[in-house]
Image (cartoon, rainbow, N blue to C red):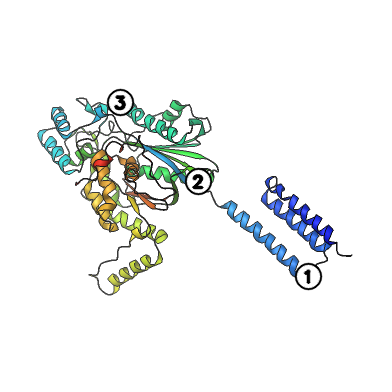
């Protein structure tokens, strides 16, 4: 068979060019196969009988198909599109003087209990402008179920409204809803209350997390991430709060009175998505998550424990072993996380220091890996000044690194599972988060359990968020605590 002419070859080449638009109509594997067949036909017509041409062409075909299928099996990245934080109304502010005055008027507290709470407040690191729900401004405080539901609606509805407004979504655009609240679990659930309020679609996947402590906020995001890995082209919302009216303690046992003094109103909403277009609109990408716990250990399990006192009054006991249990939990969690995100040199120095301490010099200090080599910002548990400083010591962090946690504690108090997003809001308000920066969100809750999220900033965060709870006071911070 004679070789085709130059003119015929040109026509054949033009025909090959003309079929390129088929790439938008056919699946990629089918289109690849079509192109291979076309070029094989060209080789035969040109009488290119050398085996090397056919071998290279088929090799490229199999390589392209393998790459396509490997890539298609990988889940889409999960993006944190935006988040919102609740700012309570001014009428809910509780200065120290008002708190102590009201406590002294409650018959359940004796003089010693009031004095203990006064000392705890002064040393807590809280400001005079934190918030308690309306039910706890009553004398005596209202702690029945109806008040708790009112508090949940008071916090979660504005957070949800703001988040939908920011992202320009409607309730029907949401495919997954996760609501976490540790101490209050009504029936119907809090997630059902949200679905009912916003008339969300019937096939939405809803989850309600309770009893998870302060780490529930990060655990909720981790759960949303896992769901988004198995459900393509979806959008999820995580709502985090703690209902204080149901957790108020009206007894005289000092370890249980601490909760009354440091826990304050707060709530946050986080919107996540694995849609392709979310990459262009999102603030952050979730690049890593890790969960560990020590509930198998009695010391950790009972470090913070909800139980009745000798008079049958329910409250949360914070035991003296709490900081030790937290330290041990963090040590194992950080070691595991470090092995996954730290550079080899940091891991090497850490291992060598451990071997040296065990085999050569038992008085030698163990090298603390420098997480600041891979992470630029830290959202730490804002449960109290001692805990923040204990975590900072374990991670070798400086004052600027723990500033968001201390300032959040000062301005808003311990907001349990939502506090991390107030810390991130503080950093955004200070224009500290740059494109490419990594943020480590470290959740810590009863059990004791840890959940870490590592976020990567996708764009500079420089816009002024007028709805942020920090918008009217960010210029006053930082202050000396």
Q: Which mark is residue 279?
A: 2
**Residue at 43% across, 26% down:** 197
What is the x, y in percent for residue 443? 34, 47
| Left or right of 270, for residue 310 | left
Position of residue 196 relative to residue 206, above or below, is: above
**Which sits earlier in the primary sequence, circle 1 or circle 2?**
1
What is the x, y in percent for residue 352? 33, 70
Position of residue 455 relative to residue 202, above or below, is: below
What is the x, y in percent for residue 236? 47, 39
Q: Which residue is mark 1?
A: 50
The one nearer the camera, 288 or 12, is 12
Which quadrant would residue 121 be assigned to in this image? top left
The one nearer the camera, 200 or 188, is 200
Label 2, secondary structure: give it.
helix
Q: Which residue is mark 3?
A: 147
Q: Quadrant of the N terminus?
A: bottom right
Which callout, 3 or 2, points to the residue nearer the camera?
Answer: 2
* Residue at the extreme front of the image, as rendered: 7
Which quadrant would residue 270 be assigned to in this image? top left
Do the residues under discs 3 and 1 have CB atoms within 8 angstroms? no
- Say few, some or many: other residues with alpha carbon within 10 Å of mark 1 (under 14 / 14 to 19 / 20 or more): few
């Amino acid at each position: 068979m004679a070789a085709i002419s130059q003119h015929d070859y040109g026509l054949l080449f033009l025909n090959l060019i003309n079929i390129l638009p088929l790439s938008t109509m056919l699946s990629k594997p089918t289109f690849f196969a079509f192109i291979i067949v076309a070029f094989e036909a060209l080789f035969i017509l040109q009488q290119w009988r050398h085996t090397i041409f056919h071998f290279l062409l088929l090799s490229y075909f199999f390589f392209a198909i393998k790459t396509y299928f490997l890539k298609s099996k990988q889940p889409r990245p999960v993006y944190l599109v935006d988040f919102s934080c609740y700012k309570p109304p001014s009428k809910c502010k509780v200065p120290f003087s008002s708190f102590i005055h009201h406590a002294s008027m409650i018959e359940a507290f004796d003089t010693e209990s009031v004095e203990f709470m006064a000392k705890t407040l002064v040393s807590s690191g809280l400001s005079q402008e934190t918030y308690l729900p309306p039910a706890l401004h009553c004398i005596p405080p209202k702690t029945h179920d109806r008040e708790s539901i009112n508090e949940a609606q008071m916090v979660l509805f504005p957070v949800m409204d703001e988040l939908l407004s920011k992202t320009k979504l409607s309730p029907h655009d949401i495919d997954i809803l996760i609501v976490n609240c540790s101490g209050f679990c009504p029936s119907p659930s809090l997630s059902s209350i949200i679905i009912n309020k916003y008339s969300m679609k019937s096939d939405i996947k809803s989850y309600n997390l309770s009893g998870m402590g302060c780490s529930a906020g990060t655990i909720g995001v981790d759960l949303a991430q896992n769901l988004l890995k198995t459900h393509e082209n979806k959008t999820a919302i995580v709502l985090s709060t703690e209902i204080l009216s149901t957790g108020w303690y009206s007894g005289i046992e000092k370890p249980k009175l601490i909760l009354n003094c440091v826990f304050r109103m707060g709530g946050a909403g986080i919107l996540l998505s694995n849609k392709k277009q979310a990459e262009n609109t999102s603030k952050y990408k979730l690049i890593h998550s890790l969960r560990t716990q020590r509930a198998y250990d009695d010391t950790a399990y009972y470090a913070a424990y909800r139980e009745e006192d000798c008079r049958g009054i329910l409250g949360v006991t914070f035991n003296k072993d709490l900081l030790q249990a937290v330290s041990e939990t963090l040590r194992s969690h950080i070691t595991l996380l470090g092995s996954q995100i730290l550079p080899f040199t940091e891991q090497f120095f850490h291992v060598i220091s451990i071997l040296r301490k065990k085999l050569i010099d038992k008085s030698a200090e163990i090298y603390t890996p420098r997480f600041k080599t891979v992470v630029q910002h830290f959202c730490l548990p804002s449960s109290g000044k001692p805990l923040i400083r204990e975590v900072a010591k374990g991670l070798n962090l400086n004052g600027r690194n723990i500033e968001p946690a201390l300032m959040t504690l000062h301005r808003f108090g311990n907001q349990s599972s939502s506090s991390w997003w107030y810390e991130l809001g503080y950093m955004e308000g200070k224009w500290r988060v740059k494109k490419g920066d990594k943020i480590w969100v470290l959740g810590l809750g009863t059990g004791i359990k840890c959940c870490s999220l590592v976020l990567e900033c996708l764009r500079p965060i420089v816009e002024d968020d007028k709805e942020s709870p920090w918008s009217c006071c960010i210029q006053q911070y930082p202050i000396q605590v």
